[in-house]
Amino acid sequence: MIIHTVKTGETLNSISRQYGLTPLYLQNINMLPNPENLVVGQNILILFPEIIHTVKEGDTLFSISREYDIQVNTLLKNNPNLSVNPAINKGDEIIIKFDDEKIKNVITNGYTYGTLPDKELRAVLPYLTFISPFTYGVEKDGSLIRPDAENTLFTASFYKTEPLLHISTITYYGNFNTEAVSVILNTPALWEIFFENILKEIEIYGYAGVDIDFEFIASSDSLKYAELVEYLKNRLNKYGYIIIAALAPKISAEQKGILYEGHNYIAIGSSANYAFIMTYEWGYTYGPPMAVAPIESVKKVLDYAVSEIASDKILMGVPTYGYDWTLPYITDGPGAKSISNEQAVLTALNYGAEIQFDAFSQSPYFYYTDENGNVHEVWFEDAKSALSKLRLIEMYGLAGCGYWNLERPFPQNYMILNSLYNIDSFNFDS
């Protein structure tokens, strides 16, 4: 695997010749938003195929998968263009295997608001063990507020991507409300009702388990929260269902702040089947310009996490987005605009900006001036930053990763993930 940084005057044609590959091949594995006009500083993923199948008359994806004794999903992972357009024609070249050796098996999860267009949903599903439609809400009586997720669940079933029932403290209006959760935590008589409501939804919609994301929990409720997670795990595991608990990105047990104090890493880590660590949002809408997930900050969180939780129970959070700040940054100002990584590259192209790469944060950024003379600073993720983060799964011996969120396309990342690791299907023995 090579990450090629575009230099002045380079094109997809010239880069492909340099590596003995075709422009179409590079476009297919990168799914570039700007194949005709690359941006100086843009990072291109270079993978070398080991086995290529040339499509014959009468071939189908199913027949090709049987010929090589692999799953159709493997073909879709290796050839992301097929998810966009699954039709194959005589003479097409299908990548059966790349020459990179897989490091280990991992599990993956992805979060979606359920607004993802079907084509984009199908493009990411082959790379996911789980998908978590965002989000069920919870009431004071233990009842649940159901999201509109039926299309996501229906489509996921074709790829054997297992859905998780995501439940959080976020309300219909998008704000955090922990009052109902506090009532439940402090009323053990409601725990059975809460569980029965969860189990009912699981059985109706075919969820593989629960992804619980209770944030801004009072410090006085932290151990009760862990006890509830353990109660749910014990009940769910008997039916063959799992529970993942989301945790704020802490660097010590004594870390102050309402976001952190309610999450006891030792207690919740031992209570849940897996812990999802939200290692992102250092750069955020109302903060100053900086990388969303600086690598050293991510490492500090993981250093602490593995000291409190078994590493093979941890899923590392991976962001799929960036931010565009209008300068000068003003505290309490309008905030940065959230953008996709593809949108960031197109913005650099449209304004003639050169993309830089910050070695310390391991993240790309650039500046541009808009039509009104306003200077902007953009931080985002690309192939190079994705490789830096995904290597941490191996370094720390983690179970895998989770993506926030699928609404932001990031195809290079999934190809790197697929090159480094075998993505496991769900297999839980209760």
Image (spheres, rainbow, N blue to C red):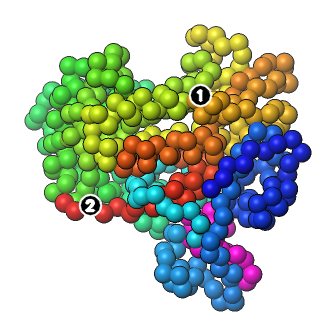
Give, as a three-letter code, the residue at label 1: Phe
Q: Secondary structure at mark 1?
A: loop
For this orientation, the residue located farthest to the top is 331
> Which residue bears the numbered disc 2?
428
SS class of the residue under badge 2? loop
**Residue 121: where, in percent of width, then height?**
55, 56
Residue 102, labelled with which disc? Answer: none
On-image quarter of the C terminus: bottom left
Q: Quadrant of the N terminus?
A: bottom right
Q: CA distance from mark 2 to mark 1?
A: 39 Å
| Residue 143 drawn at (x, y percent) | 25, 40
**Which residue is nearer to you in this view: 195 or 78?**
78
Residue at the spot of label 1:
360
Q: Report if residue 322 is visible in the image.
A: no
- Apparent side of residue 337 relative to residue 139 in the rendered image (left or right): right
**Image position, residue 332 (x, y; %):** 58, 11
Q: Is residue 231 magenta?
A: no
